[in-house]
Structures are given as C-alpha cells and as structure tokens.
Amino acid sequence: MVKRKKSVVNNKGMAMIVAIVMAFIFLMLVLTVSVLSTTAYKRAYSRRDRAIALNLAEAGLADGLYRVNYKNYTGAYGTPSECVIPEINFAGGTYEVTESGGELTSTGTYRGKRRIIKVKVRNPVDDANTGGIAEVFNKHVIYAKKVEMDPTETATIKGNIARVTLALIDAGTNQYTATKISSCEPPSLGFTVDSVSAPTFGGPTTITIRDDDGTGPPYTPGADPIPGNINYWGDGMDETYTLITGCSLLANTRWRFEKAATDTLKVIVQNDTAVASTGFLEVINGGSIELKFDGANNPNLQGVVKADGNIDINSGVASPNPIGVDGYSETVLYAGGSIDIDYSTGISGPVINGDVLAVGTITLQGPKVKGSVLSASNINLATAASAIYGTSSTKKAPIIVNSSSSAVSITIGASAAPKIYLDDGTNNKAAIIAYSSGLAPATASVTINDDIITDGSSNAVIIAYTENVGGAGNASINVTKVIGNDIDVNACLFASSDTGNGNITIDNNNLGGTDEILGVIVANNDVKLEDNAKVSWDSSVYKSSTLPLYGAFTGGRRVYLPVIGSWKEVK
C-alpha cells in the first residue's frame, strides 16, 4: 500500500510538462510564421522598390530621348549629348542619364534601391545633317504629302502611314496606323551622283589606224600601218576593221581607229583576239564596236574598250572569256552612244569585270557585271536576269542614270528580276539612282515590272530625284505588274524633287501572295496604291548600330533612336 501511494505522488508534474512543451511548440510555429511573413513583406517591398527604380531608369531614358528629339524643337537639331540629365527628383525617387560613345546609361533610385539600364543610340553623330536618322524613316512604311487609293480598290498596308492628306484608304486595308504631319519634308541626297566620263589612256604607245581614202582594199595608211591580223574593208561609204585569230593588243598600248572623212566606221572583235590588261582599244569619229562571243569567237579582252558610237556584245560560245580583269574597279566598257549586252539566248556570255558606262541607252539582258552600270540617258534591264555587283565598284550605286539636261529613266522589265549586290555603304549609297538636274524638262523615273533582289542592307534604296531644274522636274517610281508577275522588292523607295513632284505608284497586284514591297516608301508628293498593292514595314534594318539608317540622305528633320535589341540592365 505504501509503494502504490508513492507512485501516484511521483506522476503529479507530468501534465505541467506536457503543457509547457505544447506551448513552446506553438510559440515556435507562431514565431516561424511571423519571421516568414516579415521576410516576405520586406522582400515584396524590396522588389517593389527595385521595380520602381527600374521604371525611373526607363523614364530617364524616355526623358533623354524626348529632350534631344522634341523638347522646345524650333527647327534646330539636337545631339546625343543633349540626352544627358543631372540627377532629377521624380515620383518620390530620382533618375539621371549619362552618355558615352553613343550609349545612354540611365540610373533610377528609389528608397535606396538602384537600377541601371543602358541602350545604344543609332548613328550617334553630333551633326545637324547626318546624325541620327531622318524622321521620315522613323518606323514609317509610307511617308508622303498624300496617300490615296481609288474608291473601288483595296490594298494591304502593314505599318505606320505619315501623311498630310489621306484619301480613300479603307480601314480594311489591314494593319496600319495613320499619323498626321503638318508638312512633307523628305531629306536630300547626301552625296554627289556619279556622272558619265570617258576613260583616258595613260600609256606610252598609241597606234592610230586610219585608211586615207576609205575605199580599200588595199589599206592606204593615213596614219600608222595596220597591225597584223586585222582585216580591212571599205567602199567609200562604210569601213570595217575585223580583228581575227592571232590579233593581239599589247600592254600599255592603245589602238585608235579613225575613219575617212565621209565614212561610217565599225570594228569587229572576234576569234581569239587578245587585249592586255593595260591595253586600250578605242574607236573614234562616232565609230562602233561589236564584241562577238558566239560560235568559234571567244576573244580575251582584259583591257579597256571604248567607242565614240555604240558597243554591242552577243553570246553563244561555251565558257566565254571574261571582259576585264577580276577585281578591276574602274571603267572597262565605254560608249559615246549606246551599249547593248544580249545574253538572252540561254547561253551565258562573258562576265564583265569593271564599270559599264554609256552616254546613250544601256540595255542589259542577262550579264553578270562586277561593277556599276552608268548611263547619261536610260538603262533597260530586260528578258533575262542580270546580276550587278556594286561591291566591285567605287560608284555610289550599282545602277545609275544621271543627266544635267534631259529626262532619264530606268526600266526593270518583265522577266528581268535583277540581283543587286551592295557594299557596306563605304561606296554604295543606294541600289538604283535615277537623277536629273539642270534644264527643263529634266525628269527622272524608275519603272519596276519584276522583282528586284537586293541583299537587304540598309543602303538598299531605289531613288528617283531631280533638283535645280529650271521648270517642274518631276521624279517618279512606278511599281507595276506585267502579265504573270507579282512584284517583290526589299528596299526603300524614294521619289523627290526640289522644284516639282515626287510620286510613287504601287501596283504589285499581289492577290493573296507573299510578294510585297518590304521597306519604306517616301515621296514628297503623292503615293498611290493600286488594286491589291501590298506594302510592309521592314524592321530588320533598324537592328544594326553600325550603319546609319538609309545613309544616302542628309538633312531633314533628324531624330536619335535607340537601337532595337540593345537595351540591357546592368545592375
């Protein structure tokens, strides 16, 4: 009995111990929840403060770009340095903006939290005419005085339209916005357009070939004796020199063909005739040259070929020798009249290494020209696809017409679909230029009836431009479908005149297809969209910070824009 009572007495404190342990556990749970809640609360506030600091940094960038581009704008131009903003209080925090090497750094601070972001500015040049980009290229697909359609027609437009007047553009034409501008002021050309100039011979030896009476045979020398392997024929009315097998024009030597006073003159180059790389084949007095690359004819012409009259080149021989030397960047073919290069037979003709220049019309049907093509009149690309490599030329564009006294035109014919290659902007400022100035009526036009394939660079620009014309010198670009050809062009189209109207018409008739005008369309007067026209803004050229956007132009309203994809947070 005594032992049982003792056991009961020994268990008297157990309930108290259990209660204390349970209370302690509960207290720890409460404490844990409290700590977690407090930590989460602090973390939430920290994140909120960091987010506000980031917003402040972005506000700083927006403020900097606003100050340089728009604040108090009165016609003067800003520079990237005007983006700099000392620390400024805003929304309970601060932001400041610095600039270095064309990169803006904005720091936002809020309740001790700092966020720093950086963004590059496109073309950060402190120059009123070349810095930034012209505002006409600021993400517009069309910039013009007037944009219009006929009442019964439809078009597909993707991008922003900046215009003074908008006429009959149906909202159903697709994904576009329209911005009202008070005036249409495109920039001007920022370079001097190349003009046609004859190549000159600087070597020590000139052989002048002229028959005194023009009646041969025999050849009656009026100057130097006729070189070997040259046949001569004349009837007192016409004269022909034919360069045949074994004929060779040596280095640093010029053959200068002349005619009798009343005759017409022609030189035919055929068989295996050779002209050294520093040789110079010249026909004067309005004489013409025919270069034959057909049948058994495959001359090896590495030097310059020049005619006062016309030059004709045909094709048909297998594995033709090139004209000029690979890598040559000066004029290799020059005509005071016209040049006709016809490879439309389906058999390729010679590759032309060097520039092709003519005072008259140049017609290309399928050649590969590793240089520029320049005329003072007209250029026609027809029938077969030509490839023009401006990368091998020092000219401002692979295709140029330039006249100071007459109308000029460039025509991309049906089935032509030329391929145009451009350099990085060092020399080539555009893909195609039709330019006229001086006496009225000096007009410039580009007609596009088939695809133009460019490399998509930011200097892929097609320009029709007139200036300093005594009368109304209009400039125009017409993109018009010919039977079966939906038209695809990846380039900026630019038509402007300082005394007349720059007009662009788009009728690529792309009903449900993928072909389109991908780029920017700029005119100082009217852009007209015909039925089923399709135009889209091209964002890809905006992503490079190494080249000015469409660097062919200067002046105009300039803006500094961030480079797409360059935004980054550094802290």
Image (tube, rainbow, N blue to C red):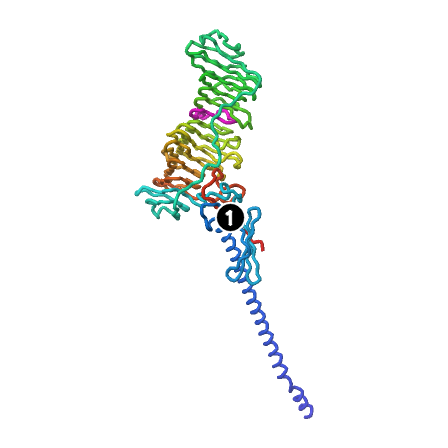
**172 left or right, relative to 375:** left
Magenta extent: 340-362
Splitting the image into 4 quarters, where does residue 4 fall?
bottom right
Q: Position of residue 55 (x, y in %)?
A: 51, 57
Residue found at the very far left of the displayed protein: 152
> As displayed, is residue 152 above or below residue 436?
below
Residue wearing tag 1 = 562
State the image quarter where residue 312 is shown: top left
Q: Nearer the viewer, residue 277 or 6?
A: 277
Q: Quadrant of the N terminus?
A: bottom right
Q: Secondary structure at mark 1?
A: loop
> In the displayed image of the protein, which residue is found farthest to the bottom?
1
- Number of numbered discs visible in the structure rendering: 1
Image location of residue 544, percent across then percent down? 52, 43
Image quadrant assignment for residue 376: top left
**From the viewer's perspective, is residue 338 above or below residue 423?**
above
Spot occupied by residue 314 in the image (x, y as percentages of width and height): 46, 22
Quarter containing the C terminus:
bottom right
Nearer to us in this view, 30 or 541: 541
Magenta residue check for 37: no
358 is within the stretch colored magenta: yes
Is 561 situated above or below 297? below
**Amino acid under disc 1:** Pro
Disc 1 residue crowd, few under 14, some 14–19, many 20+, Cα 10 Å: many
Q: Position of residue 284 (x, y in %)?
A: 47, 17
